[in-house]
Image (tube, helix red, strand yellow):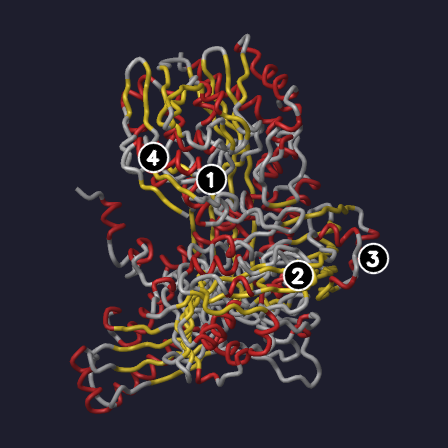
Amino acid sequence: MMSAVNAAAADPARWPKRNAFEFAGGTAVFIDDVRPSVLLHMAVVRSSRAHARLRRVDTAQAKAVPGAVRVLEGREASLHLRPLPYQFGDPEMIGGRRIVLEALPVDEVRYVGEPIAIVAAESPRAARRAAAAVVVDYEDLPALLDARAFLADPDPIHVIAENEVVSGAADEVLRTAEHRFGAEFALGRSSTAPIEPRGYVAAWDGTRLTVHATHQQPHQLRTELAEVLDLPAHAIRVVVPNVGGAFGLKMTGPVEEPLVCLLSMLCGRPVKWIESRAECFLGGGREQLHQVEVAHAADGRLLALRDQVVIPVGAEAVSPGWRQAYVSTASFPTAYVVPHLDIRSRVVATNLPPWHSCRGFGKEAPVFVMERILDMVARRTGLDPAEVRRRNLLRPEDLPHRMASGYRMDSADLPTVLNRVLELDGGAEADGVGIAVEVTPEGGGHAGGRSRPGATPTVAAPEAAAVLLRSDGQVEVRTGVTNPGGGNDIALVRLAAGELGLSPDSIRLVQGDTDLCPPGTGNASSRGVAIGGAAVVLAARALADTVSRLGAGPLTESTIAELVVRYGPLEHVREYRPDPPEDLEYRYSYPYFSSGAYVARVDVDRATGRVRLRSLTAVHDCGRVIEPVLVEGQLHGAMAMGVGLALSEESRFDARGVLQASSFKEYLAPRANDLPDFVIGHHETRAPHTLLGAKGAGESGLGGALAAIANAVDDALARCGGREVTSIPLDPPTVLALLPEVDQ
Amino acid sequence: MTTTFARSLDEALTALAESAAAGAKPVVVSGGTLCVPAMVRGELDAADVVDLGRTGLNTLAVGSVIELGALVSYQQVISSPRVRAELPLLHRMASGITGGIQIRNQGTLVGALCAARPQSDALAVLVALQAEAVVVSASGTRTAPVADLLVSPGTTHLAADELVAGLRIPACLHGTGYVKLKFAESSWPVVTAAAVQDRVVLGGVAGTPQVVPLPSRREVRAAVVDHLDALPTEHRWADLRAPWAYRRRVAPEIAARAVELAEEAR
């Protein structure tokens, strides 16, 4: 007999996803299931040197490998391809220098794993064999692999951007304050590790290029390909099948995107490239070094913060990854009031693989640093960590709040989410308890700061939706929002169904097809429902109005079919962008801030340094919660990723710059058995500038979870005479090194 | 690459002998959970592969000595009530094997032995139980203590034409304990300790399992410290998961915990 709990769990209304089993069981169509006839397979020849001049790339032997159809190195590729365009705008907007990069290098390689040549062959194995037969003659050059090496010898040639966020007189306050301390913090490099790596199938038919891609941003990919391949955009169709996770990895920019298309155009056959797991783990981000000085009052109030930041973003790139460094700097001092602030970051190019966008998008590092600082203040003042936070948090009446960077925090109730998570936390016995408050700027562009005089005001990127009637009695919704697997499709369908008075089963959603869907930003910056959903609602309302004016009565399968016969599909297209703030002095950036508070409880094995997470509790505020189950699913994923970053995930390289963590046996993402059941509460502070009052869910949770866990480990260590936590991941060797040896 | 899907042990041995005579270094596949992915990734380059999957070497016989064939999976060990009763140490180790349901059903003890990886779940336990390997080739059969078969990380005293057809493990009913330290569910073990009677065997501290005799159960930590400090530098094991200094610091505690479990199981 089914128990009451099981009966509730089996209620389909509670579990809205319709295709969850197909995703979990792998029967959904993913990119590798796209198998056109006469398909060729691409393999990539990658650099084995961290930094070297390319003396010669010899493809003769590779061309002779049975099954090899085409082998292409940098010089030949550059005859066919234009340089790669910058993604997300000009680098100068965020204090960056400009570089011109080709898809394949001609003279110099800059990291181990950089593509040098590509092969198209009749089978994946033949392609790999031919790739292995390409002979590269290198002349090694000095390599910079470590941010600490840069700090020891800070040659400006490596600095690709500098950012500063300054307000007040931090120097003076730090000089004269009675209570002050310094600390150094380090975050390790980590990756995104979706269950499905990248992959593309390009098919050129002589006039038109169709690209299937596991991708977040089909329209941006189309724009990039048009530019690099010198084709009109309308000659390119990008189609996104089901996606097995993205987390930033699948934004536009990796060089394999134009390369697989070029091979298809040169060979006149479809060409597929599926990334291997080891290739997927080359990419990463999030690594940072912070040297902070803090001044505070005896009552725990923060007075001044100086932070000198070094952010090693890997090899210089035009893809969006390096831009996360700007967001880190601009997001200080997160949820708190710091009257005197001086944050200066140097963004450093190294000879590791370039950063790719990683869930968190730079917002996690400042949360870690600020939350460690608040705990350090609590320890030094003898105050309760929660009380120190209450004394420094922005209050609801402080909002909207213009941060020193120019970011505008629209709304939140930070003291309430903190108090609520402290109530919700079960208080389980544990060696250490840590709390964290997180704010997550979401939903738009990341460039902040004041507008330049005379510059055109920047506006939020829109999303668009088309809603139309189909002759089969269904309603079709086409959206520019794509689904990375988290289920935003369900939210969009239910929003449309609600406006039209229909069952979700009557709605057919089309996503991820540049021929069918209106332009949009795909999935990025937690805006799929808050902004994309608003466009769906507006288009559905417009259609409902029209139907009502036509006197057609309530929509049913038969009335829809009749309407199509009489009037056609009655397609309505609407675009939506969040309300622009009236203050044009500043560049438009993130339209809303999600927020949350987190409590972690951990046990620390004093003899081994092994940390076991006992509980993790969150109260999350993403404005109006439209689909609680989907929001919680996003939050579960972000918190699990935060656990991984806090305790075990690290992209490690050896002294020659060769990736060591190239599989899930070395890159330790948490599994279900590593995690407790998360406890989640919602608090709704409706977004004042979005139609639905919704904010973003997806990125928030990562920084809060990792900071709360770091603080919990620190608490446990402090109780047994350990040193303070200043870095993540807190793997057992790191934790054990913080513990006194006498313990044994 | 040639792959032989041998239908009997003899067929496998013939294929091995031919390959070895031709000067190749054939790879023998039992469960394949380590070597097949390594071949797919291009890390293991084998001219000849001999797959034992159809040889029927999957019998698990329990008498005064437990005999298990080269294809016996961890799941067979876990599912056997006799193994649970008469080799609780082996049962415990198999139950916590690193990897999910697929690894438990596909991976084999003999495969783990032949892979000779310091980060193995199994090796310290096999050495502690004084397991013997049945080593066969086209020219004959020999038995060798597992401890003697292991040379260094990834290397065994198996000739190119030899394979391990099975293991013989004397029953060991009481007084055993096993502790494994790893860093996440997905992680390979970092340090393992198997305690039996008057000794504890450590995995993950050196290239091969280290047998530490215990003159007294109260002096476990000191005995382990002395043993590790006497290890020649070139035998000290470190990998991506942890440096030697970490292993040196935690191993006495892991050993002591294993011995404590063994005491409780007396």
Residue type (three-letter) at the residue carrying disc 3: Glu
Q: What secondary structure is marked by label 2?
A: loop
Q: Are marks 1 and 2 in contact (CB under 8 Å)?
A: no
Residue B24 is marked as: 1
The location of residue A506, given as percent across then percent down, is 23, 72
Could you tell me which chain the residue with mark 3 belongs to?
A
- Do marks 1 and 2 share a chain? no
Q: What secondary structure is marked by label 1?
A: loop
Q: CA distance from mark 1 to mark 4?
A: 15 Å
| Residue A457 sits in quarter | bottom right
Query: Which quadrant does the C terminus of chain A fall into?
Result: top right
Q: Is residue A569 left or right of residue B214?
A: left
Is residue B94 in view from this perspective? yes
Residue type (three-letter) at the residue carrying disc 4: Ala
- Do marks 1 and 4 share a chain? yes
**Residue occupying the point 40% across, 22% down:** B133
The location of residue A94, given as percent across then percent down, is 67, 70
Residue A110 is marked as: 2
Q: Which residue is mark 3?
A: A172
Q: Are marks 1 and 4 in contact (CB under 8 Å)?
A: no
Q: Nearer the viewer, mark 2 or mark 3?
A: 2
Q: Residues within 10 Å of mark 4 (few under 14, many from 20)?
A: many
Vertical arrangement, residue A620 with respect to residue A561, above or below: above
Q: Nearer the viewer, residue A702 or A150?
A: A150
Q: CA distance from mark 2 to mark 4?
A: 47 Å
Q: Nearer the viewer, mark 1 or mark 2?
A: 1
Could you tell me which chain the residue with mark 4 belongs to?
B
Q: Which residue is mark 4?
A: B12
Q: Are marks 4 and 3 in contact (CB under 8 Å)?
A: no
Pick whichever of labels 2 and 3 is earlier in the sequence: 2
